[in-house]
Amino acid sequence: MNALLEFDRVSKWFRDTVAVGDVSFAIEPGVTGLLGHNGAGKSTAIRLAAGLARPDEGAVRILGEDPRTSGAARASLGLVPDGDGIWPGLTARGFVEACARLRGVGGPGAAADAALAAVDLADVADRDVKGFSQGMRQRVKIAQALVHRPRVLILDEPLNGLDPGQRESVIALLHRLGADGTAIVFSSHVLGEVERIADRVLVLVNGRLVAEGAPPALRALMEERPRRVRVETDRPRVLAAGIAGLEGVGRVDVDEDALVVETSRPADLALVLPGLARDAGADLTAVEPTDEDLESVYSYLTERARGVRR
Amino acid sequence: MIVTRLAIRALLLRRRSLALLLPVASVPFFVALGIVRGDVTPDSQAIIVGRLLVTTVTPLVALVLAVTAIGDERESGTIVYLATARLSRIRVAAEKALAAIACSVVLLSPALLAAAYFGVHLGVGVDNILRGVLGTILVAAVYAAVFVAVGLLLKRALVAGIVYVLIWEGAIATVAPSAERFSLTAWGRAITDGGLSPLEDGLVPTLSAQTGVVALLVVTAAAILLAGLRLGRMDLP
C-alpha cells in the first residue's frame, strides 16, 4: 500500500543553497511533527509536499501521485499555509465556502459550516475576516483546509499566534483528526510543542533529515547527548583536576577564571561540584549549561548523523 | 467560476482600480469637447475611439487590472489556495483573465457610452457603434490575457506594460505602417474604425477587421495557455 504522503530522495535548492537535501520519509495516518530551527527547510518541505514547489531531484507523492500534476492528489490534500492572506471582503463562512467550491465540494455551504464549527468559529461565521485576531484567522485557515475532508493535512506553524486556550483547542482537533485516520504533518521550531502533539517527529537540520522517531525516543536521544557546563571559579585548574576523574566527564577546558566541562551526566556533576569546590578551597561564582538551546540539540543530531559523534 | 468571482470582488475593492476611472474619464471629456466645438467628424471619431480609447485608455485599464489580479494573489499568499484547488492551472489563468476583462468592461463603460453617443451624434450607424464596442472589448481581452501571463513572468510587469503601451502602441505603431502588423491596438483599431469613411490617410490600419478579430482572439488564447503553463511550472510562495 502507498503511504499517504511520501518523499523519495527529494532535494530542492535555490542557487547554491540546499533548502532540502536528499530527504526521504513516508507519512501514514496520525500526527507527524516536522521539527527544525528557522531556515532548516521546514517551509520548503511543506511547499514541496503541497505541490507548490517542484523538487530538483526525487519525487513527492500524495496517494502515489504527484500533487503538482494530479487533481486527485490535490483533492486529498488540505494545506494551512504560514502566510496570513485571505481574499478581501469575505466573511469567515464566505472564505471557507469559496475554498470548498475551489475543491469541488458538494454542498459547500454546509461543508463550510461544519468546518467552522470544528474550529469553534461557528458563532462568528458571518463576520468579516478583516476584523479577526491572528488566532481567529489561523483557525479560519484551518477550517478551509478541513472543508473537503482531506486525507492528508499539512500545516505550517499552525500554533503561531494562538492564545493558550486556542492552542489547546487546535491540539485536540489535530489529535482527533489523526486518530480518525488523517495523515497530519505540521511544522514547528518548538520541541515541547511537537512532543505534545505528534506521534512521530522528523528533525530537519540545514535541509537534511537528521533524526526521526517517536517523541520519547527522540527526547531520550537528546538527553543522552553530552552537555557542556561552564563553571566560573577562582581556582579553575585545581577544580579541573577533581572534575576530570568523575564518571561521565569527557573533556575539561580550562580558562583563566572558568572551566568548561563536557559530561554525559550533568545532574551528577551538579551534585558533587559543591563538595569538590570545598575540598579544593575554590569559590564557585557561576555554574551554567552552555548548550541547552535547540540549536545545540540540532547541532548534536547533525554531527551524529554525519558520523562525527557516535 | 469561483476564481473569477473572487478576483472581480478583490479587483473592484482596490483603490487602484477606482483610480483607473481618471484616464477613462478622458473619453467622455473629449466627446463633450468635440460636440461643444462642433467637431463631429469621422476623423474625430477615429481619434477619440481608435487613438484614445483603444490605443491608450483600454490597454492601461486592462493591463493594470490583469497585473493586479495575479500580483495581489502572489503578494498576499492567497495564490496557494488556488494552486492547491482541484482546478487546472490553465483554468485558473483563464478565470483570472476573465475577471480582468469583466472589470475592464465595467470601468470602461462610461467611455464606451460616451463613444457610442458620439457615434450616434455623427450618424455612423449601429454597425459602426457595435464595431467600436466589440473592438474595445477584444483589445481589453487581449491585454488582460497577455498581462496575466506577463505578471507571472516578470516582477515589474506593470512598469513593463505601461512602457510598452506608451512607447510601442501609443507612438511607434501609430506612425509606422509596417509596425501595424505587430500591434495589438492596431488590430483593435482595424475593427473599431474600419467602417468609418472618409478618413485621413493613416488614421486606420490597412488590416481588415476580420484579420483584427482573428489575430486578437488567437493572441488572447495563446496568452492564457502560456499563463497556465507558467503557473503550472513556477514555484509558489
Image: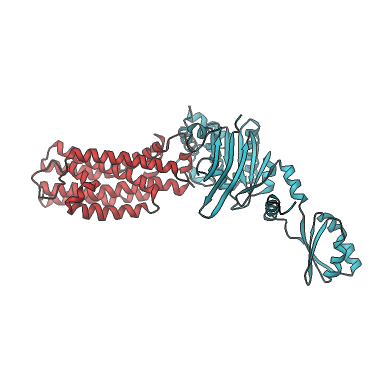
Chain colours: A cyan, B red
Left-right relation of B167 to A208: left
Q: Residue furthest right?
A: A279
Q: Position of residue B217 (x, y in %)?
A: 27, 38
Left-right relation of B94 to A307: left
**Which residue is rendered at x = 77% and y = 70% of the image?**
A255
Query: In this view of the protein, which residue sits in the foreground, B124 or A66?
Result: A66
Query: In this view of the protein, which residue sits in the foreground, A210 or B68?
Result: A210
Q: Residue furthest top?
A: A106
Number of dots carrying numbers: 0
Q: Position of residue B167 (x, y in %)?
A: 25, 56
**Which residue is rendered at x = 52% and y = 44% of the image?**
A55
Say which quarter of the image contains residue A79: top right
Q: Position of residue B154 (x, y in %)?
A: 39, 51
Left-right relation of A113 to B167: right
Left-right relation of A293 to B117: right
**Which residue is rendered at x = 16% and y = 52% of the image?**
B33
Q: Residue furthest left?
A: B198
Q: Can residue A137 be seen?
A: no
Q: Position of residue A12 (x, y in %)?
A: 54, 47
Q: Can residue A258 be seen?
A: yes
Question: Would you place residue A292 above or below residue A121 in this image?
Answer: below
Q: Quadrant of the N terminus of chain B?
A: top left
Question: Would you place residue B183 above or below residue B91 in this image?
Answer: below
Say which quarter of the image contains residue B116: top left
